[in-house]
Amino acid sequence: MSKKLLEIENITVRFGGVIAVNKVNFSLEKGELVGFIGPNGAGKTTLMKTITGMVEPQEGKILLNGELLNGKPIHERINLGLSLAQQIVSPLNSFNCIDNVVLACGKNKTKNLFKSLFINETAEEEKKAKELLEIVGLGEVLNEYPETLPLGYLKRLEVARALALDPLLLLLDEPLAGLNQKEASSLGDLIVKLNEKGQTILLIEHNLKEVIRICKKIYVQDNGRSLAYGDALDVMKNEDVKRAYLGTNKNA
């Protein structure tokens, strides 16, 4: 029996009098690739921020590999095995692609700022960064600078930087946003390959076509509440999901 890697139990988040996330329960097992969808205002971003530590819930708890995350700062959650590839990519434009990833690979060496000033040896990190860039399909642009690359490449660079942290759980926040269908399909294929190699992934995404194509399981949230979770095709046949996410047209 596989072990639950991520456990979200009765999470509630309020902003003033507004309930953004309402008693949500959700879990992810090791090795899974789960799509996380829902209409605008469903509370997807808020729930993601509670996982990463950007928002603290008023109620409930979040566990990663059995470790309670509540109250822990972002860097401690990263050290426990959490990594996020953000929707709005923000690479270091003064660094080329490989150096962007090298910096992430060296997280253990840069924990102490003072000690990191005296570290000159980066061969191990460079080797790992090159391997990661090859994996995400950027092997031919190792020395290119981010500002010279198209968005599709930058999305892959963001994934490589997230993978450099050796995550137990990789959160992908709308990685397909802004891409044309060919680019989205190609990046979707990469996500599947990463999962097939054992990477556990929670994919927050609006591109429903790709989510259904690549994810065996889907979790749906609406108005801050859990709406459906299970086999992708079964979930998309759910009448509540159709009403909330697709409208009432059963052929949609």
Image (cartoon, rainbow, N blue to C red):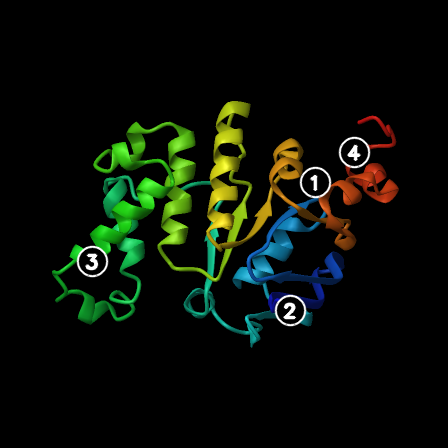
Identify the residue position indicated by label 2 in the image: 1
Q: Nearer the viewer, mark 4 or mark 2?
A: 2
Identify the residue position indicated by label 3 in the image: 124
Which picture quadrant has residue 211? top right
Q: Amino acid type of disc 2?
A: Met
Q: Residues within 10 Å of mark 4 (few under 14, many from 20)?
A: some
Q: Height in image: 70 above or below 165?
A: below
Alpha carbon separation for disc pair 3 and 4: 48 Å
Identify the residue position indicated by label 1 in the image: 40
Q: Earlier in the sequence, mark 4 or mark 1?
A: 1
Q: Height in image: 209 above or below 20?
A: above
Q: Which mark is residue 246?
A: 4
Q: Earlier in the sequence, mark 3 or mark 2?
A: 2
Give the camera-side residue of 30 and 143.
Answer: 30
**Are dots 3 and 4 in contact, CB under 8 Å?**
no
Give percent across and percent down for residue 239.
87, 41
Give percent across and percent down for residue 250.
86, 30
Give the camera-side residue of 169 and 22.
Answer: 169
